[in-house]
Every structure is written in structure tokens, then in C-alpha cells.
Amino acid sequence: MQHEQGFNSYGEIRQWLQENLGIEISYKNVHDLVHSRMKAKPKVARPYSVSHNQEQCENFKKNSLRT
């Protein structure tokens, strides 16, 4: 979880555990361990909308009132 590349899903974490450590663990247990006990989550960027316009976002940030 501390590596820069990270995991994209709990399924990838589960697969890594099987391949590298020989540990077979259910999806639910992986989720509980990572999410609840480690307070971590897979590193997945949220997708942009089809209509997303980066230039409009930057203009909004520059011109909006800051409180």
C-alpha cells in the first residue's frame, strides 16, 4: 500500500497476496483489512466527465471568490 504505483482494486490486492505470499483470502476480508483496519484504499483516480474542459476549470479557479 505504501508503494507509489499502488493497487487499482481490492481484487488486485487479493491477487497479489495469492501470487506473492500464497495467501488465499476472500474479497470481503481484504476490503475489511485494508479499508477498516489500515484506513487505506486503492489508488484510483476518479474519471473525468465526457464534457470536462480543463481550461474552463482553471478559469473558474482563478476567477472564483475565495473565502
Image (tube, grey):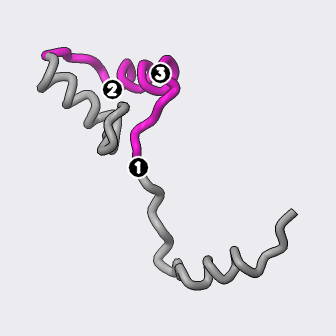
Residue 41 among magenta residues = yes
Of residue 49 and residue 63, the one placed in the foreground of this image is 63
Choose the circle earlier in sequence order: 3 or 1: 3
Residue 4, given in percent of the width and then of the height, sits at 33, 42
Q: Quadrant of residue 1?
A: top left
Given the image, on which type of amino acid does mark 3 rest? Answer: Met
Residue, disc 3: 38
Quarter of the image with the C terminus is bottom right
Measured Cα–Cα span from mark 2 to mark 3: 15 Å
Camera-near label (2 vs 3) is 3
Measured Cα–Cα span from mark 1 to mark 2: 18 Å
Residue 47, given in percent of the width and then of the height, sits at 45, 63
Residue 52 among magenta residues = no
Disc number placed over residue 44 in the picture, else none: 1
Using the image, determine if residue 40 lies above or below residue 8.
Answer: above
The residue drawn where x is 40% and y is 44% is 43
Using the image, determine if residue 32 lies above or below residue 16.
Answer: above
The residue drawn where x is 43% and y is 55% is 45
Of residue 40 and residue 2, the one placed in the foreground of this image is 2
10 Å crowding of disc 2: few (<14), some (14-19), many (20+): some
Drawn side of residue 8 relative to residue 39, left or right: left
The residue drawn where x is 12% and y is 26% is 19
Q: Bounds of the magenta span? A: 22-43
Given the image, on which type of amino acid does mark 1 rest? Answer: Val
